[in-house]
Image (cartoon, rainbow, N blue to C red):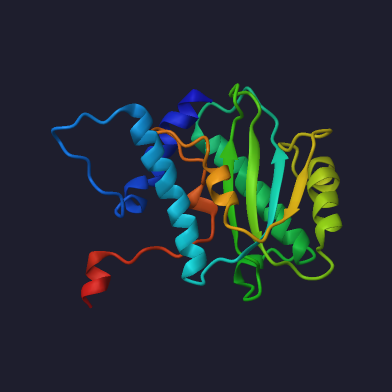
Amino acid sequence: MQLFRDKLQKKQNIRRYLRATKPPNPEVPVKSSQLTSNLRNAHTRFLIQQVKRGFFSPRWYIVFHLKDKKERQHEDEWVKDIRHVRNMFFQSYYQGDRDWKDKLDRPKAIWGLEFGKQGITPHINLLVENTKDEWDEDKLHHFFAKELPRDLAKCVAQRKSVKVTDINSSGIFGYINKETRWEFSPIIYSISDYEKQPTNNQLSR
């Protein structure tokens, strides 16, 4: 698990999301707590900017647990499991259609992973845009609490509490980034839907 935390930050290239953070004065040493706070705020600002730009409009905040499998030795195994969960969610949402990525009406989603205060309770923080009527709060709760762990994704823990919240505030963004550290980002950018920032070359065209 620690190896996952150590490597995930590098793969996700968080420097792209810290451009708005003022560089520290080289003559003033940066404390780890200050750096952690800056990183956490940067991730939170990133999510808020996605909403302000109109790219992402979250409706549901969903929390569910993963099994703490001993064979997960590095980041790819965690992300592989979560990617499978994502596939099962959207395939079920579109009644088994495996081409769900091509759906123009697909609700965008941002996926995050946390381990809890003791580092032993891996769980997903999922933000999802407005879903179709039949996928209301009760349906979402039943899917993540019953259907997913029982039939579709064995990596999801059974008999663990599942929380589905209808949100109307961006205040949740800071909460899901509370475990941010210099070596660990809770948001899994590689499987989340977000508006990528243009490169300098694209801006100059």
Note whether 102 is above or below 181 in the view shown.
below
Question: Quadrant where the N terminus lies?
Answer: top right
Image quadrant assignment for residue 93: bottom right
Q: Viewer-proximal residue, 77 or 184?
A: 184
**At x 76% / y 34%, what residue is drawn?**
157
* Left or right: 192 as drawn, with respect to 168: left
Vertical side of 205 occupied by 137: above or below:
above
Left or right? Give the position of 54 relative to 153.
left
The location of residue 127, given as percent across then percent down, is 63, 54
Query: In the picture, which quadrant includes the C terminus?
Result: bottom left
Q: Looking at this view, is 169 or 195 the one in front?
A: 169
- Establish if 72 lies above or below 176: above
The residue located at (50%, 35%) in the rendering is 75
| Residue 72 in the image: above or below residue 16 | above
Foreground of the two, 188 or 58: 58
Q: Answer with left or right where residue 191 lies relative to residue 153.
A: left
Image-quadrant location for residue 183: top left
Q: Residue furthest left?
A: 27
For image coordinates 85% across by 57% down, the residue present is: 139
- Give x and y (percent) for residue 141: 82, 50
* Closer to the camera in the image, 104 or 100: 104
Instruction: Give the tally of numbered discs.
Output: 0
